[in-house]
Image (tube, helix red, strand yellow):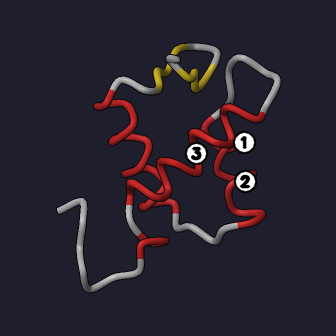
Amino acid sequence: MIVDVDTNPQNQIYYIGGLILNILKQQKNVAFSYMDVFETLNKEYKVSINLYTLSLDWLYLLGTINYNEKGLIKCF
């Protein structure tokens, strides 16, 4: 379930997904490696690798990010 009333919103994939999109938006590069985005996210917000991966999966399913040989790419 994406929305759960028993946990903090900061621990939800839609919130982490928004943070990931914000990181991709602020950076000047076009493509980012999987771990570069994770390390940037963890500087300010402590996120587990599992929650990060689930958030990336969710963003990919929504069509907001793509992944190719260069790395993560924001689609809009």
Amino acid type at mark 2 = Glu
Could you tell me if the residues under marks 1 and 2 are in contact, i.e. CB atoms within 8 Å?
Answer: yes
- The location of residue 44, given as percent across then percent down, is 75, 66
Q: Residue at x 52, y 67 (%)?
A: 48
Q: In this view, which residue lies farthest toward the right?
A: 28
Label 3 packing within 10 angstroms: few (<14), some (14-19), many (20+): many
26 horizontally vs 20: left or right: right
The image quarter containing residue 28 is top right
Q: Residue 39: which numbered mark, if any? A: 2
Helix, strand or loop at disc 3?
Answer: helix
Amino acid type at mark 1 = Asp
Q: Residue 47: which numbered mark, if any? A: none
Q: Residue at x 47, y 26 (%)?
A: 65
Q: Residue 36: which numbered mark, if any? A: 1
- CA gap between label 2 and label 3 equals 11 Å
- The location of residue 67, given as percent across then percent down, is 49, 21
17 relative to 10, above or below: above
Label 2 packing within 10 angstroms: few (<14), some (14-19), many (20+): few
Amino acid type at mark 3 = Ile
- CA gap between label 1 and label 3 equals 11 Å
Could you tell me if the residues under marks 2 and 3 are in contact, i.e. CB atoms within 8 Å?
Answer: no
Residue hosting label 3 = 20
Helix, strand or loop at disc 1?
Answer: helix
